[in-house]
Amino acid sequence: MASITLEGKVAIITGASRGIGEAIARTFVAHGGRVVLAARKLDGVKAVADSLGDRAFAVAAHTGHEAQCEALVRSAVERFGAVDVLVNNAATNPYFGPMIDTDMGAWAKTFEVNLQGYFWMAREVARHLRARDAGGSIVNVSSVAGLEAAPMQGVYGATKAAVVSMTKTLAYELGPSKIRVNALAPGLIETRLSSAIVQNDAIVAEVLRKTPLGRYGQPDEIAGGALFLASEASSFMTGQVLVIDGGMTSC
C-alpha cells in the first residue's frame, strides 16, 4: 500500500515565500522531502528555507521569465541531484474589477506568471524527468475561479481555467512517460493574494453564504492536497482537479 511520504524525493515549489507555497514546503519537508523554494525576491524565500534546515534550498526566480524557469530547474538539479516533483504555485492577481475594464498591462502580467510560467516550469521538469527515464508528479495550483464565473477577477479566473486545460493535456501527453499531472483548485484561502477579497466584508459574506463549512480556508488546508498529489498515494491519478473549497462549488 502506497503511503503519503516524500522520502527520497525532491520538489520544486514556486511562490514559496509565504501563503500556500510556504505551507506546502513545510508539509513536504515534514513528510521526508527535500525542497527547492522559489520566489521573485530571495530574502523572503530564504527565510523560509533557512527555517527548514538543510532539506530546503532557496532560489530567486521570476517564473514569468522563461530563462529563469530554465535556470531554476538547473539549480535544483545541481543542489539535490534530481527533481521528482513540481508544484506550480506562483501567481499574481494585480487587477480587481470588471473584466472589460482590465488594463492590458495587468492582463499581460497575469497571463505571464499564472499560465506561461506554469508551462515553462512544467516543460523543463518534464524534460528532466524524461531524460532520467523517471516518473514524477506535477501539481498545478489552479483555483475555483477557473471552474466557474469569477466576478471582479475575470482575468485571474481565465488564467486558472487555462491551467486546468493545460493540466489535462499534459497529463494525457506525459502519461506514457510515467509523469502524472494534476491540479489543485482552492476556494477562498486567507493569503496576501486574496487580501482584496478577505478584507471586503460584503464579498466575504457572499462567499460564506455559498460555502457549507461557513468559513474561508487557511494555507495549511491546501498543503495536504498537494502532498497527496505529489506522493505515490495518488499513483493512479492524473489529469484531475482536486477541489478544496469548503464545499463552495458543490452548491
Image (tube, rainbow, N blue to C red):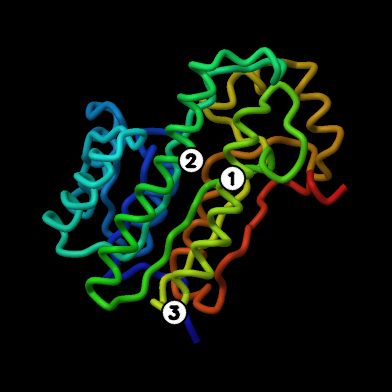
- Disc 1 packing (10 Å; few <14; some 14–19; many ≥20): some
In the image, taking residue 32 as reference, residue 19 lies left or right, namely: right
Return the residue found at the far bottom.
Answer: 1
State how far apart marks 3 and 2 are (Cα): 24 Å
Q: Residue 162 carries which label?
A: 1
Residue in view at x 29 percent, y 67 percent: 9
In the image, taking residue 124 as reference, residue 79 lies left or right, namely: left
Return the residue found at the far left.
Answer: 78
Q: Are marks 3 and 2 in contact (CB under 8 Å)?
A: no
| Position in image of residue 166 (x %, y %) | 54, 54
- Disc 3 packing (10 Å; few <14; some 14–19; many ≥20): few
Return the residue at label 2.
115
Q: Do the residues labelled 1 and 2 touch (CB within 8 Å)?
A: yes
Residue in view at x 67 percent, y 12 percent: 101
Secondary structure, mark 3, is helix
At label 3, which amino acid type do we have?
Pro
Return the residue at label 3.
176
| Position in image of residue 220 (x %, y %) | 52, 45
State how far apart marks 3 and 1 are (Cα): 23 Å
| Position in image of residue 8 (x %, y %) | 27, 71
Q: Earlier in the sequence, mark 3 or mark 1?
A: 1
Residue in view at x 63 percent, y 44 percent: 161
